[in-house]
């Protein structure tokens, strides 16, 4: 079946019950009619409106439409993977009063994973960060080299300028630069933002994730230490003049989703003063403190999906070494595998999505044609892709997919004569 036929099949009301986490409402419109609207509607249905962020003027028009179309296409490809790969489909997180399937996590990670592109497109922000001088008090921080101090300072400055108050390494709503935390919510006649933030931190130990799925799989810590993240952010900022969209996106996600939790509670508390912050129902959906480590896991996957190794380019390798990024070089790079199911699916779906490859800089009326021209067959440990339209550049698609082997534990076999690609693990 073509990807278009697969998506049509998933959208039938009977099949939506299997994978659409918010099945009390159904998806009725073809998602690519308005991909931005599809994403926003899903976040609203999930009562997570604060994930709908203003991307800024640099990110409007064609660029925004392309990224949204890619995210929606990758979203459905990820669902196909989860329905056919047992270890992914079985990844369910159970609490006494809450069961979260893989699809709950996938809704959030995939549809938010490129939301940092609006910030990456903001050249003014990058220039402002590059022009910053470290204050004298920061120069005297112990146990850090001058380069490491700079990378940490620029990361903190980015969080400050974007009003990002939380981090998976420092916990929800840790203040920075000595300022009070701005939650972005109205605390009049409610428990204070600071009080709620303190309660929220009881559910999350910084620099950990601590998730155990029903099938025994465990996620305990972030994929990379904070120093690797800050150094990579500094490398992208200095060499490319950009705030890396994966790192910014992960920070934005954790910040917005925890703000959303607090805002939902404040709204519910106004109606019912007996509401408990650790476990309450708002507009028919359950919110509980145990979700906070899950939000951290999703944020970690968003951050990690864009941390690239330097390849075999010697100049690039030496640059990575100068920035202290030895963990991203060669065999030291921790390749993604099924032990991290959410990142595994994100890595593959993000890479094999044909919209990302064939629509970049082209006419978007071709989206349906592209989805109709590519067959996708998924089994428990293989993915077979067949391109049936000769107008699509097979070599271009292959080059993108072959790069998966650099950072994901998969093998890719190319069959040029039949225009087929075989991925297995």
Image (spheres, grey):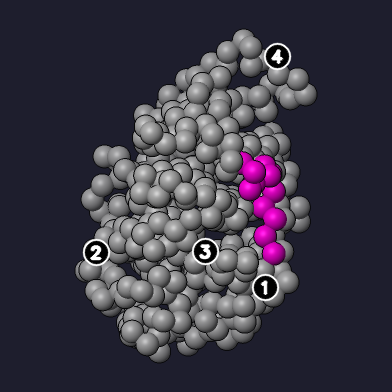
Q: How far apart are marks 2 and 3 (CA)?
A: 23 Å
**Does the magenta-highlighted stretch encompass residue 178?**
no
Residue pictured at 58% horizontal, 66% vertical: 97
Q: Mark 3 points at which residue?
A: 105
Distance CA(mark 1)–CA(mark 4): 47 Å
- Secondary structure category for the residue under label 1: loop
For mark 3, give the secondary structure.
Answer: helix
Say which residue appears at 64% left-offset and 43% top-offset.
202
Residue at far front of view? 274
Q: Taking the image as drawn, is residue 316 in sight?
A: no
Identify the magenta region. Answer: 201-212
Disc 3 versus disc 1: nearer the observer? 1
Disc 4 packing (10 Å; few <14; some 14–19; many ≥20): few
Location of residue 98 (image quadrant): bottom right
User: Regarding mark 2 in the picture, which secondary structure is present there?
Assistant: loop
Q: Distance between the residues labelled 2 and 1?
A: 36 Å
What mark, if any, has residue 34 been given in the picture? 2
Q: In which quarter of the image is the N terminus?
A: bottom left
Q: Position of residue 145 (x, y in %)?
A: 73, 24
Q: Where is residue 300 in the image (x, y as percent from the top left)?
A: 59, 51
Q: How far apart are the two marked residues, 4 and 2, measured between alpha carbons?
A: 51 Å
The mark that comes first in sequence, 4 or 2, is 2
Q: Splitting the image into 4 quarters, where does residue 424 fall?
A: bottom right
* Magenta highlight on residue 202: yes
Residue drawn at x 49%, y 86% is: 377
């Amino acid at each position: 079946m073509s990807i278009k036929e697969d998506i049509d099949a998933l959208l039938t009301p009977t099949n939506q019950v299997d994978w659409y986490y918010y099945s009390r409402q159904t998806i009725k419109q073809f998602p690519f009619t308005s991909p931005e609207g599809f994403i926003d509607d899903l976040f609203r249905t999930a009562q997570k409106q604060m994930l709908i962020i203003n991307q800024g003027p640099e990110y409007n028009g064609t660029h925004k439409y392309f990224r949204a179309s890619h995210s929606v296409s990758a979203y459905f490809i990820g669902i196909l993977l989860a329905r056919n790969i047992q270890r992914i489909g079985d990844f369910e997180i159970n609490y006494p009063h809450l069961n979260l399937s893989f699809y709950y996590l996938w809704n959030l990670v995939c549809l938010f994973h490129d939301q940092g592109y609006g910030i990456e497109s903001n050249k003014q922000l990058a220039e402002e960060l590059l022009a910053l001088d470290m204050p004298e008090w920061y120069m005297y921080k112990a146990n850090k080299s001058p380069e490491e101090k700079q990378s940490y300072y620029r990361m903190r400055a980015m969080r400050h300028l974007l009003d990002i108050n939380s981090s998976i390494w420092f916990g929800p709503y840790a203040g920075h630069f000595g300022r009070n935390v701005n939650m972005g919510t109205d605390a009049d006649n409610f428990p204070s933002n600071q009080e709620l933030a303190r309660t929220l931190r009881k559910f999350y130990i910084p620099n950990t994730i601590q998730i155990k799925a029903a099938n025994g799989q465990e996620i305990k810590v972030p994929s990379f230490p904070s120093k690797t993240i800050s150094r990579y952010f500094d490398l992208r900022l200095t060499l490319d003049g950009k705030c890396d969209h994966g790192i910014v996106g992960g920070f934005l996600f954790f910040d917005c989703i925890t703000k959303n939790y607090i805002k939902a509670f404040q709204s519910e508390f106004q109606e019912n003063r007996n509401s408990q912050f650790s476990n309450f129902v708002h507009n028919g959906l359950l919110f509980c403190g145990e979700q906070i480590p899950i939000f951290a896991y999703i944020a970690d996957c968003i951050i990690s999906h864009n941390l690239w190794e330097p390849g075999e380019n010697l100049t690039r390798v030496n640059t990575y070494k100068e920035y202290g990024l030895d963990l991203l070089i060669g065999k030291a790079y921790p390749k993604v595998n099924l032990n991290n199911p959410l990142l595994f699916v994100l890595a593959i779906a993000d890479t094999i999505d044909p919209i990302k490859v064939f629509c970049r800089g082209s006419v978007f009326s071709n989206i349906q044609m592209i989805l109709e021209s590519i067959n996708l067959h998924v089994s428990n440990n293989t993915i077979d892709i067949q391109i049936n339209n000769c107008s699509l550049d097979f070599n271009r698609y292959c080059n993108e997919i072959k790069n998966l082997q650099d950072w994901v534990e998969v093998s890719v076999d190319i069959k040029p004569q039949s225009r087929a690609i075989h991925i297995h693990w």
